[in-house]
Image (cartoon, helix red, strand yellow):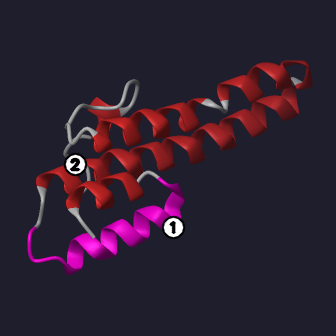
Amino acid sequence: MTNRTMAIVAYITIIGWVVAYLSYRKSDDKSPLVRYHLTQSIGIILFSIVLSIVSGILVGILPSLATLFYIISLCPFVLMLMGIITASNEAQRPIPLIGKLVEGKFNL
């Protein structure tokens, strides 16, 4: 698998992240592009989990805001698409909202 492909696959759910991570670890060439996008992708996955928990609790308390939280829950999907576009261009730009927070946080 090429470095560009590994960077793109990293954004496709947690299973894609695991496949890209295992391919990255197995490869002889440890590309900084793949490492960067693996980090950004795991940040999106963790953000999605936290957002899901928080919105579930808040919708349980305030059911009238369910539509608003449904729209907000699309945010990780949009971030994933932005990450895929960035990875396909072979660029290393942080994802909006959370990209700067996760840069350098994970030792991959």
Q: Residue at x 31, y 43 (%)?
A: 88
Image position, residue 108 (x, y; %): 22, 63
Question: Would residue 107 be counted in the magenta stretch?
Answer: no
Q: Name the magenta segment's main secondary structure.
A: helix
Task: Report the amino acid beneath label 2.
Answer: Tyr
Mark 2 lies on residue: 36
Secondary-structure class at tag 1: helix
Secondary-structure class at tag 2: helix
Q: Residue 77, located in which quarter of the rendered image?
A: top right
- Label whose residue precedes the other's in the sequence (1 or 2): 1
Q: Is residue 7 above or below residue 71?
A: below
Q: Are marks 1 and 2 in contact (CB under 8 Å)?
A: no
Mark 1 lies on residue: 15
Q: Is residue 11 above or below residue 18?
A: above
On the rendered structure, is 65 left or right of 52? right
Residue range highlighted in magenta: 12-29
Task: Report the amino acid beneath label 1.
Answer: Ile
